[in-house]
Amino acid sequence: MEIKIIPTEKTTEVFKPTVGEKMNDIISRFELFLDQDEIDNLITETYHILSNCTNPKLLQEQDTTHLSVGYVQSGKTMSFTALTALSADNGYRIIIYLAGTKTNLLSQTTKRLTKDLIKDSSLNNIYKILENPGLAKVSEIRGKMRLSTKPTILITLLKHYKYVNELAEIFKSRIIQQELGKQGVLIIDDEADQASLNGFSYANSKKASVSDEWDEETDNKESSTYSSILNLRASIPNHSYVQYTATPQGPLLISIMDLLSPKSHTILTPGKKYTGGKMFFQDFPDLVISIPDDEVYHYKDNPLTSPPKSLKESLQLYILNVALITNHWNKVKFLSMMIHADRQKDVSRLFHGWVEELISRWATILNLEDGDIARIDLDNEFENLYNKETSKFYSEKDNVPNFSEIKPLIADAINDSQLYLIISETDATREVDWDSASSHILVGADMLNRGFTVENLAVTYMPRYTKSKSNADTIQQRCRFFGYKQKYLNACRVYLPTDSIAEYVEYVIHEEEMRNWLKSTESLAKVQQQLILSEKLSPTRKNILPYGIVQAKMKGWHAMNALQYIENNKLVVDDFLKVNNFSLYEPQYDTTDRNHKTVRVDVDKAIDFLTQFKFGNYGDTARKMATIRYLQYLSEKTEYPITNVQFIQMAYEREYRERSFNLLNLKIDQLFSGRSTTGSQVYPSDRGIKGEDTICIQIHKIKLKNHAVHKLVGKIIYTIAIYYPDDFATGYVSAQPEILTFEDDE
């Protein structure tokens, strides 16, 4: 088969991949279930991703980062499988997969790659795959690299700092360094918004406030994982880092912009049979059913003692769908149902018990004689529900059978149902034999979230809700009901609380808007700013700052540490100084170290400056994001809004000031010059150089120093300090009617 590459406007001229036998091989098998348009999209997008990576045949130190954005359950694995094949065709010797934070996701990725690239392939010995290799595997990796067939080595890795750091040590070993040299390595980060970035709770719905995270230096799971990824990247001289995610919106994209900094991006097109948020919450909203408020289980606020009516109805509807879709029409071999009640394991056990009791009772009743009263009552329940639902979702051309034809199949659907409780990692790693039964009912919570594939999912019952505004990425990653379900879409139902439905509708709107922004611009910085400022993207709105943040951290002076992205920040500051007319800050003092310049710029220009200015640590990135939201709030409040932000160019006459820094945490020891007396003048210290009527941002140009040898010693950098007048914090707190936090299910 001949593959024709369809170039896009974004295709870089730096690296033009070529298609070889490995890409041809995988595409020939994908053609069995994709049509030509879908194949063309897959090829074009895979080519676009790789063309934005480094050229592995240029044996030199180089690295880059690329962002690939898909939908939930839309085929991202297929994309990076194709990317693997094309990368292998073009000289990448090793491909690493950061395959999720749970062992079931790691196992799932390893098995999928093994099947698609090795077992089903007509080619021999072109790939070798290892899972979580430790230092003991160094010799084995070297041996595989020395094979005359020159296979591409695939390494699947649990996204945990222990395993990522161990792999970094493998690449640092002299054995691998000598063997690999500067040959190309590709790192694929699946679900790149999870753990790789989540150092603060804007990306972590399980924490109530970001206040504990801003100044964090401890090795918690998130920041340690992020640090280990940087360690891995630093150990490989020639590599590309490709991030895959379905939820880059809001703070996630902003975090990526600062902390892992993609240079380019690709929007992945789902297959034609994909049914996602737009399908459920816009095109066919009747597929989504509201759970009455008094039936929404909450272990504190509404601890139900018996199964709610909506749960019983959802289960009966599911059983009817199995009877119709699987047993009568034979459209699919099996269907499944997911019940996602609460993150508390005891709640999942409770719902599991209720479902088990209902299934058992119905099986017993359906085994009675037709004339039995209990049998008649249950038959009537099923018949009424069947007639109501089929008349609503099917037309005459569908040739829906009468209930009398379906009735004998209901007992089969019940008796052939497998029930699973999935509340531990052990449960999640135990494989479901989907073909063993016509019906599978899965009960659980967090283990059924991100990455877990529930095959042929038809009915979802999810009363889970949050007390406060949900994080978009969190609610979206619970959408196991998205996927390729066109064949039985009329049988799909999603039961949700009313508030959750509203959140999903809102999410779909801003997801589509975000994707349109990403498609229409090559500038991720521009998209980042649009995400921050958009009123529709509630997870990123300025007025959701928790009170604790404003009261404790948005007051007084805060010195920042911009010891990464030095060249980027130099360009940002130089351009800002050039286009704005600074004047002398009064009073002037007697030395060049204490004479400064100032300018006031519109709030939008200040936000643009902060958007472009980058930090490489969690605390300063979180502060930057919160400051942008705070500025938006202060500029839009009804009483006494601010109209500008004051910038001060510190010591403008000097080439730089010298400042020592800490090698361990990469923080400047003391950014501010202190109070001093020169002649009759008293310099109030750098902290006194400010105004009280608006936010003030000082721009500092400094030369880094330290007694030890370090690559940053002698570097000249720009960094900033931000002053928040105390009165603003008081006004913010008094103006807000209720406390908004990020707690989940508490």
Image: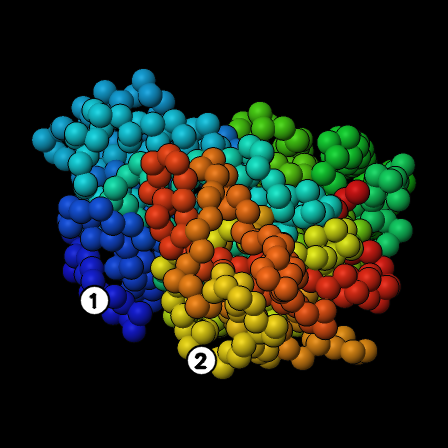
**Image quarter hosting the N terminus:** bottom left
- Residue 485: % across, % down: 53, 56
Q: What residue would you read off at disc 2?
A: 579
The amino acid on which the numbered mark 1 sits, given as a three-letter code, is: Glu
- The alpha-carbon separation of the residues under discs 2 and 1 comes to 32 Å
- Residue 49: % across, % down: 32, 58
- In the displayed structure image, the side of residue 493 where residue 360 appears, left or right: right
Q: What residue would you read off at disc 1?
A: 13
Foreground residue, 408 or 412?
A: 412
Q: Label 2: how many residues lie within 10 Å, few (<14), some (14-19) or many (20+)?
A: few
Residue 572, disc: none
What residue is drawn where x is 29% and y is 29%?
172
- Residue 496: % across, % down: 74, 54
Question: Which residue is at the far front?
Answer: 679
Q: Quadrant of residue 168?
A: top left
**Image quarter hosting the C terminus:** top right
- Residue 287: % across, % down: 67, 61
**Does residue 128 sit above or below 625 in this rendering?**
above
Foreground residue, 458 or 360?
A: 458
